[in-house]
Image (cartoon, rainbow, N blue to C red):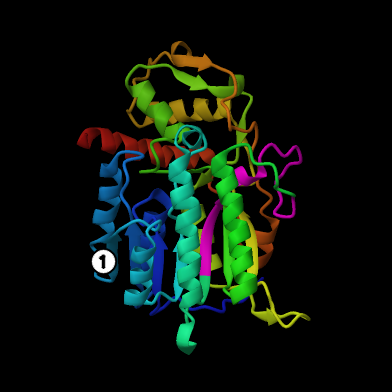
Amino acid sequence: MLDKNISLAGKTVLVTGAAGFIGANLAGRLLEEMPGIRVVGIDNMNDYYDVRLKEERLERLSAHESFVFVKGDIADKLTVDGLFHAYRPQVVVNLAAQAGVRYSISNPDAYVASNLVGFYNILEACRHSYDGGQAGVEHLVYASSSSVYGSNKKVPYSTDDKVDNPVSLYAATKKSNELMAHAYAKLYDIPCTGLRFFTVYGPAGRPDMAYFGFTDKLVKGEAIKIFNYGNCKRDFTYIDDIVEGVVRVMQHAPGRLTGEDGLPVPPYKIYNIGNNHPENLLDFVTILQEELVRAGVLPVDYDFEAHKELVPMQPGDVPVTYADTTPLEEDFGFKPATPLREGLRRFAEWYAGHLEKA
């Protein structure tokens, strides 16, 4: 197991996408557990999904005196440069991105702006954080995605696999992030770690994700569409497991070494964070509906069969996601392990309270 080489206590940490699902949960965990930490969050608060969810997350974070929020877009270079100049973050976690496989087909501009231009701006700001002999950024951690594996036939997906055949623009932008980070690690000795997340879910999550969208439709009495006729498997990863993995990774930056060419050996790593246990989509739907009934979101006599529609695969989707988490276990002594039923139970209980407030 790797030793910690970064202490987060007393540090300034920049979290981009701080009003997002993962960003807000990560920021909250850091503020609650790391003594003397200052978390600077940036988010453009776009309306890809209900902004009220983002505002609720920010409201909880704002209860902490050491949380600073900046409303802005990382695709704006002046905003990013100003942020780095004003706060001089020592650790950066880039979670800001336009998410969603299907949305990338209809609205590609948003992905190029946020995922490519935005990440470039973060890399450039990290690069110039060392100007004038400053200590600069000690570690850049950034979100990649299981989507980079495309339609790989070999499972479980390993970070050693070749990932040159994305099946969506979203996946292509995430693969591009990994390549960009590698180049900057090589050229400018920026310690970078990329994290390939696998289907993150939990309370107050993203409404565009299947479990949330299914619930919304069932509550309204609408039919839910189950793609690929139910022959899909997903490695569902509970939000607390994702955050635990990110926090552990933040505290160990890849080592800075010099190669035979006199240039840095890229201080660069990639890890999967997934549950290492893919669930069949039909089983997932069964568990979800059972937990929604248990939480009182749906009545006991709800006719689920009448509200299910099996349909073909959507463009950009893949039939299975399955994470090989061995490197994460070996290096950080951690493997996501929250059972799907337990995670969906927590979501259903949150949703019941969410309905009451609506």
> Which residue matches tag 1?
64
Q: Residue furthest top?
A: 306
Name above or below for residue 248 compared with residue 145.
Answer: below
Q: Is residue 298 one of those drawn in magenta? A: no
Q: Residue 348 location in percent, x, y?
A: 38, 35
Element at badge 1?
Answer: loop
Residue 124 can be seen, yes or no: yes
Name above or below for residue 63 compared with residue 275.
Answer: below
Residue at image location 34% in from the left, 53% down from the top: 19
The stretch of residues the image draws in magenta is 140-161
Residue 345: quarter of image? top left
Name above or below for residue 165 compared with residue 131.
Answer: above
The quarter in which the C terminus is drawn is: top left
Q: Residue 318 location in percent, x, y?
A: 63, 33
Q: Residue 56 location in percent, x, y?
A: 26, 49
Nearest the camera: 156 or 148?
148
Looking at numbered disc 1 in the image, what kind of residue is underneath it?
A: His
